[in-house]
Image (tube, rainbow, N blue to C red):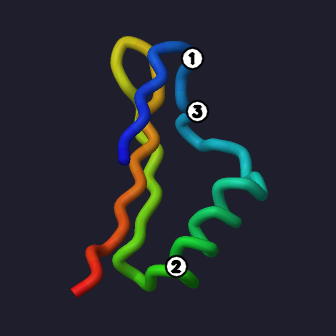
Amino acid sequence: MRVDDDAGVLAATPPAGVGIGNLRERLANLYGPGATLTLSPLLPAGVRAEMRLPCAS
């Protein structure tokens, strides 16, 4: 799943927060190491949040 926001910017060094870390830990506990959450900057402005979950086999 990918969500793009075309406003604002992603800080080069984002402050340590609780929410993103908790979400990444929860994904890892539920789906294992194949689950990821990444934040990336969009140009000229914006942020992309992308979550990947492994498919069940």
Tell me: residue 23, above or below residue 27.
above
Which disc is residue 28 wearing? Answer: 2
Query: Dot 3: few (<14), some (14–19), or many (≥20) neighbours within 10 Å?
Result: few
Q: Which mark is residue 11?
A: 3
Residue type at mark 1: give it. Gly
Instruction: Residue at 34%, 18% (x, y): give it.
Output: 43
**Vertical order, 34 against 7 (above or below):** below
Single out the residue that lies furthest toward the front: 57
Which quadrant, please, contains the C terminus?
bottom left
Cα separation, mark 2 vs mark 3, equals: 25 Å
What crowding class fits label 1: few (fewer than 14 Cα within 10 Å), some (14-19), or many (20 or more)? few
Look at the numbered discs 2 and 3 and tell me whether their residues touch, using CB distance below 8 Å: no
Q: Residue at x 44, y 85 (%)?
A: 32
| Residue drawn at (46%, 58%) of the image | 37
- Sequence-earlier tag: 2 or 3: 3
Q: Is 17 left or right of 34, judged from the image as shown? A: right
Label 2 SS: helix
Label 1 belongs to which residue?
Answer: 8
Q: Amino acid type of disc 2? A: Ala
Please provide percent x and percent y for residue 22: 70, 66
Give the SS element for disc 3: loop
For discs 2 and 1, the disc positioned in front in the rendered view = 2
The residues tagged by marks 2 and 1 sit, at their Cα atoms, a distance apart of 28 Å
Q: Nearer the viewer, residue 50 or 42?
A: 50
Alpha carbons under labels 1 and 3: distance apart:
9 Å
Name the residue: 48% across, 23% down.
5
